[in-house]
Image (tube, coloured by chain):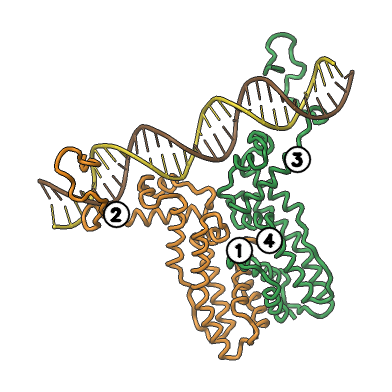
Chain colours: A orange, B green, C yellow, D brown
Amino acid sequence: MPSAKRAATHRAPRKPVARSPRRDVGRPRGEPVTEAVLDRTLEELASVGPAQLSVERIARAAEVNKTSIYRRWPTREALVAAALERVLTHLSLAQKDTGSLRGDLLFLGESVAGFLDQPAGQALMRAVFMEAVAPSIAALARRQLEERAGSPAVAMVLRARARGEWRDDADPKVVLSMLVGALLHRVALERQRPTRAWLGGVVAVLLRGVT
Amino acid sequence: MPSAKRAATHRAPRKPVARSPRRDVGRPRGEPVTEAVLDRTLEELASVGPAQLSVERIARAAEVNKTSIYRRWPTREALVAAALERVLTHLSLAQKDTGSLRGDLLFLGESVAGFLDQPAGQALMRAVFMEAVAPSIAALARRQLEERAGSPAVAMVLRARARGEWRDDADPKVVLSMLVGALLHRVALERQRPTRAWLGGVVAVLLRGVT
DNA sequence: TTGATTTTGCAACTCATAGTTGCAAAGATA
DNA sequence: TATCTTTGCAACTATGAGTTGCAAAATCAA
């Protein structure tokens, strides 16, 4: 029974103000716990969605006590936000200079499609489309996505422009939103796999539209 | 205190089997109640999203007792499904023969954009992107959307083909998904209004890609 | 007007889950 | 070994989903 909340007996406390805990002593905070919980959260998010997500179920699945979750993240929303934030910070869309705009577009499309196929991608997509999960995290997601997806895309367009494959009046952001949007339509609305043949059709239209 | 659950005193009941209630007598089921509840449900769905949707709050907002809701729809999911189903059955995308493919595409795009601007459109979009709301209704939504959006689109493509504005190897469904997908990207991800200028940029790329 | 029939509001329940609290035990450092 | 922090555990409160029984209201038919 250490450190009664006031030690009301004798010897006044050294520091009556709330001191911040020092992190170099004591049992270390288990990284596996944090990781396991966030992983499970993502899986729940991807499978049942944010509406049916249950902290107690996550705790059971991660083999961790519920209190250990609430000690790290104050609310369910914060937990979801943390899980999504981790996805976002680890997100990096691959880019490659294939030598042709067609090749670059195909590569980018397959990269996005691959991400949307993972639990993290599913979870993120749902979160972004539902402001309600957590407005702040949805905003962050939009910012990060724009940033991460933006720079490879800009580079791609610059290369294409140098090769004379990109007309001046075609807005890169519009074209990118058409590619990604078509993928969203295919995956989330039609619930069909974005096959190579399908992606080829999209890229063909974009190519003619842009050169 | 009428109709004790068995009338255990005298005179055996005429029909011991459970008879279905006849609908031509008694107090009629209030249509305003149903309408108000579904309207409020859509608003809730559009504003706070399916995750935070509360039946009790809907009941308060619709000025109806909670039990009256549960007597019509057995669960929260069923309520959401009913609200969305009503949207779907009332959904009809306007179509118009403007005389040119560019005009037709612009009109279709603005029609979709207008729908996405309403609460019903917001609610539907969220539901479709979250299988978790109700798998069955999400599936229905996809089917209906394809059906409703498909036929105007097919007519549009036929007209364009007759005018020689549509090349044979361009898949109409792909092009449609690019248009709608770009709109989704713009509205849900970028959270920006699909202005006429922006829509013009999309249509310009599509036009060149398709002719 | 009365009786039969159905819907509605109301209040009181059960149950699951979000979130909290106090304490003892488990690890870690010095 | 002494100190410190994290963890598990059990018990708690609060809220909202979904249920139930009953009285009042509304409708039609005799």
Q: What's the chain of the residue with tag 4?
A: B
Q: Residue at x 79, y 27 (%)?
A: B26
| Residue A29: assigned label | 2
Q: Quadrant of the N terminus of chain B?
A: top right
* Badge 2 amino acid: Arg
For disc 4, the marked residue is: B117
Report helix, strand or loop for mark 3.
helix
Q: What's the chain of the residue with tag 1?
A: B
| Residue A144: assigned label | none
Q: Residue at x 43, y 67 (%)?
A: A89
Report helix, strand or loop for mark 4.
helix
Query: For the residues carrying marks 1 and 4, which lies nearer the camera in this image?
Result: 4
For disc 3, the marked residue is: B32
Mark 2 residue crowding within 10 angstroms, few (<14) / some (14–19) / many (20+): few
Marked residue nearer the N-terminal end (4 or 3)? 3
Above or below, comparing residue A204 to residue B32 in the picture: below
For disc 1, the marked residue is: B188
Q: Quadrant of the C terminus of chain B?
A: bottom right
Report helix, strand or loop for mark 1.
helix
A115 displayed left or right of C3: left
